[in-house]
Image (cartoon, helix red, strand yellow):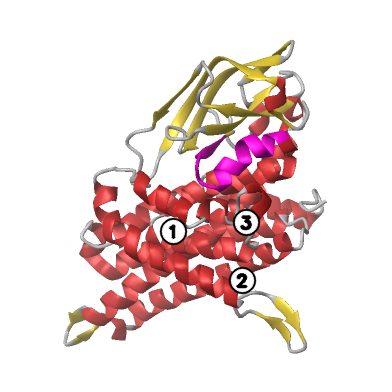
Amino acid sequence: MSPREGQDGINLELTPEQKMVQAAAAEFVDKEISPKIGELDQSHTLDMGIIRGMAEQGMLGAPIPEEYGGGGLDFISTAIICEEIERGDGGFRTLLSVHLGLNSLTLLAFGNEEQKRRYLVPQARGEKIACFGLTEPNAGSDVASMQSTARRDGGRYILSGQKEWISYANVADHFLVFAKTDRDAGHRGIAAFLLDRSMPGIETRDIQHKLGVWAGSTGEIFLSDVEVPVENRLGEEGEGFKIAMYALDMGRFTVAAGALGTIRAALDASVRYANERVTFGQPIGRYQFVQDMIAEMVRGLETSRLLVLQAAWLKDRGVRNTRETSLAKWHATECSFQAAHLAVQIHGAYGYSAEYPVERLFRNARAPLLYEGTTEIHKMMQAEHALGYRKLNG
């Protein structure tokens, strides 16, 4: 599966190290997540023991260099981990997206040495949980409309505002948040800050009554005159938008890779059910309509995997990949939702019941079409790039 160039062309086979990563992640999911997830989902319970297990496995710092407490793995291995974890449940892959993709990898790219030692090292080791605060009640796709402010006061900033739909906000130790230092400068007036839960003025709470991701955590962050030292600013004033866009490139990659896990879970459950369920004297898998739905899942899985691999290959070589990552995220999440939808259809009335896993897959697969850039945002990005209106990798 690793796109390595050789005499016979591109080699898509996993390396021995990547096979070890895959086997370890799959074993963890089969032992620690799959047996529990149905009950955890129905009871809306976040199992911190599973998160501690992910940390012990090195998943929370997989691609972070060893010198900063990580595993030093490549992005293909990181994609494998995301896929396997989402095969267990999308809520735990979401943790990888915010803690690792949006926060830690961004801190690795833009943080100074002191910031990396103070924040990145414990995050990579899994000793601290991190989240990412960009979205606000009135600022989603339109980042420049954010209302959170950061006022400079000598050697500190005073942060005020609210962040909405922040995964793992209520259990995070560290926060990477964005606020405006200049209200009139649009996206050029945004700065990024590293916050610690111990700072006075930070309040978080969970969001209730979500459609899905019941075994995960989604919350809000409230900032009330939070005093943040200048040395906690990530990058310079005015660089916040650039930093956020870099973070989204990383986060979107983990979302795309994770979507493969939902497609696989939906396909596996559907194949199993189609071979077991008998109507009119034969397994329903013998019917052409059911075969058509299975075939659609297979196509979605294989095409999505190739796009994820393309993005991973570019990331491993340090090549700008905004276009490729956007395309992978758009395609893989759409295929994931379609696979979950088809899985419910194949299961019939049972697919509407929590007795089978496809009901949970369907609910969880809806959120990725919204976060990290809606489907419509990614379509616009791809179209404007093709039309020459913008250069996504420029």
Using the numbered discs, state the Cα–Cα distance from disc 2 to disc 1 in whole angstroms.
Answer: 18 Å
Looking at the image, is 107 positioned above or below residue 14?
Answer: above
| Residue depicted at 61% across the width and 66% down the height | 76
Quadrant in which the N terminus appears:
bottom right
Using the numbered discs, state the Cα–Cα distance from disc 1 to disc 3 in whole angstroms.
Answer: 18 Å
> Taking the image as drawn, is residue 41 in sight?
yes
Residue type pointed to by label 2: Leu
Asked if labels 2 and 3 touch by Cβ distance under 8 angstroms, the answer is: no
Residue holding disc 1:
86
Query: Which region is colored magenta?
Result: 114-132
Residue 130 is one of the magenta-drawn residues? yes
Mark 3 vs mark 2: which is more N-terminal? 3
- Front: mark 1 or 3: 3
Residue holding disc 3:
63
- Front: mark 2 or 1: 1
Location of residue 236 in the rendering, given as x and y in whole percent from the top left corner: 78, 29
Residue 56 is one of the magenta-drawn residues? no
Helix, strand or loop status at disc 1:
helix
Location of residue 207 in the rendering, given as x and y in whole percent from the top left corner: 38, 32
Apparent side of residue 172 relative to residue 3 in the rendered image (left or right): left
Location of residue 336 in the rendering, given as x and y in whole percent from the top left corner: 46, 61
Residue type pointed to by label 3: Pro
Residue 306 numbered tag: 2
| Residue depicted at 36% across the width and 52% down the height | 363
- Closer to the camera, 35 or 67? 67
